[in-house]
Image: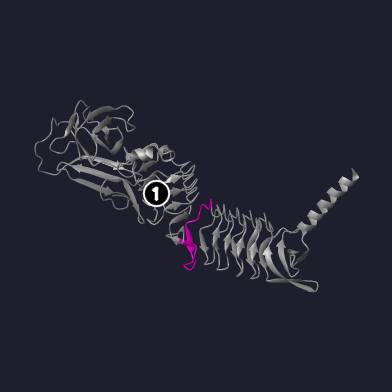
Amino acid sequence: MKKSIFITVSILIAAFSAMAGDFTVGGISYNRLPDGKSVEVTAGTMNYSGDIVIPDQVTYGTATYAITAIGEAAFSRCQALNSVTIGDNVTEIGDLAFQRCSALSSVKFGGSVAKIGFEAFYYCSNLASVELGPSVIEIGASAFEYCRGLVSVVIGSGVAEIGEWAFRNCNSLNEFAVDAKNQNFASSDGVLLNKAATRLIAYPNAKAKYYALPTSVDSIASQAFFNCFVLRAVSIPQGVTYIGSNAFSNCVNLKTVNCAANVPPTCIYNVFSGIDSLAALYVPTGKYFDYSTDRYWGLFKYIVADLMDASAAPLRTGAAFTWQAVTGAAGYTLQISADADMTAVGTYEMADTHDATNPYIVSGLDENTCYYYRLEAHNQAGIIQAKAMGVFTTGESSSGIATMVIDRQPVARTYYGFDGQLLADPQAGTPVISVTRFTDGSVKRVCQNGAPSIIKHKAPTFSSQGFAIS
């Protein structure tokens, strides 16, 4: 029994000695490294604070040592540490070296730092910018995770490896900049990509609301958009074939996903978990079935293969509907409701399309009443190929359809948000797309409150300038 106690005490003494460091000079503790010529900074018994300068070398007794590393957890949880200047002999910043240094606002890396370890700056919430020079080769997993004040990151020419979650949950981050000489990574509009721009690696959490991926991208990395709370709409190009796990997880304000791929991209798991439950997915014409039956894409409640160009001209107690034919459609279903949620509807089935010379007339509605409609085209198998949605208000005196209208008068107006959703009663000051149809068959679309340009009403697309409908 006594022997066991002795061994336990010996281990504790040895552990404390290692933690305490071999010696302390100028308020910084050091451990000698095996080569006998260099040392690493260690925690020692120090509670580092203020502004710390780590020199190139240190003299203790008669020996001078090069300072080549910052040891594991050396400055961990030093919450009064304000800034660090790292000497030019330091080649490695160890795991957890500065984790949870909540007041740390400035780090100046020396010219030899090659490796930044796991969670090295984890939860340094006051760190505003990071500039990694040409010597840095490796950024460890979660190295800057939860640096919530981090606004910009400059990745130098030498970086060859960036670990998982290196910049996850950096809620203020709006830009990655990459040195043009870097052979492994690139930046496009502040977004981090591989050098060939075929893989999107990380989207800054605080970047723009609307984003269209470069057409060169064919894959999206795991957690690339994780927790991007600003993101409202995203456009995925035709060439994308793979999306990693949790790529869009916790994008709580994501309301519109426009995917141009004819074959649903392969998803791993939880790709869209935590997004708005009413988010709409827009896919290529004729691909509704492919997406709706996919294990992950099929989780979207609203999948639209295309939007038809339809019109509802109101009558006194009804409306006259016209729309263009949809290729391959075997029939059309029209639903009308006085409820914006379309919970109580009147349903009309027809086999043929109806143009301006042969409108489809719905009667028996109430006068001077607002109604909502949804028109769907389906094939022989009953699969929806295209949709149209809108709103109209019945008139007070019209009893039929005019045979000829010379003057151009508005007959119906609908409003849509920038996420593609129909707005029954838009709030004052809310940016909207106003679609007005006139008696001569023309249509006018207006973007209010400084919205981007709209061309015509079909599936949403995106550009570097923002959201548009084309």
Q: Quadrant of the N terminus?
A: top right
| Magenta span contains residue 245 | no
Q: Nearer the viewer, residue 62 or 107?
A: 62
Residue 395 coordinates in the image, percent (x, y) = 19, 32
Query: Outermost residue toward the top?
Result: 364
Q: Over which residues does the magenta segment extend?
A: 168-186
Residue 152 coordinates in the image, percent (x, y) = 50, 60
Say which element carries label 1. Answer: strand
Q: Nearer the viewer, residue 275 or 161?
A: 161
| Residue drawn at point x = 47 percent, y = 56 percent | 174
Q: Is residue 455 above or below residue 64?
A: above
| Residue drawn at point x = 50 percent, y = 47 percent | 227
Q: Nearer the viewer, residue 279 or 429?
A: 279
Residue 387 coordinates in the image, percent (x, y) = 28, 38
| Magenta span contains residue 172 | yes
Q: Is residue 83 left or right of residue 355?
A: right
Where, by quadrant of the figure, is residue 434 drawn?
top left
Residue under label 1: 234
Q: Main secondary structure of the magenta part?
A: loop
Q: Is residue 128 visible?
A: no
Three-letter amino acid code at disc 1?
Val
Where, by quadrant of the figure, is residue 399 drawn?
top left
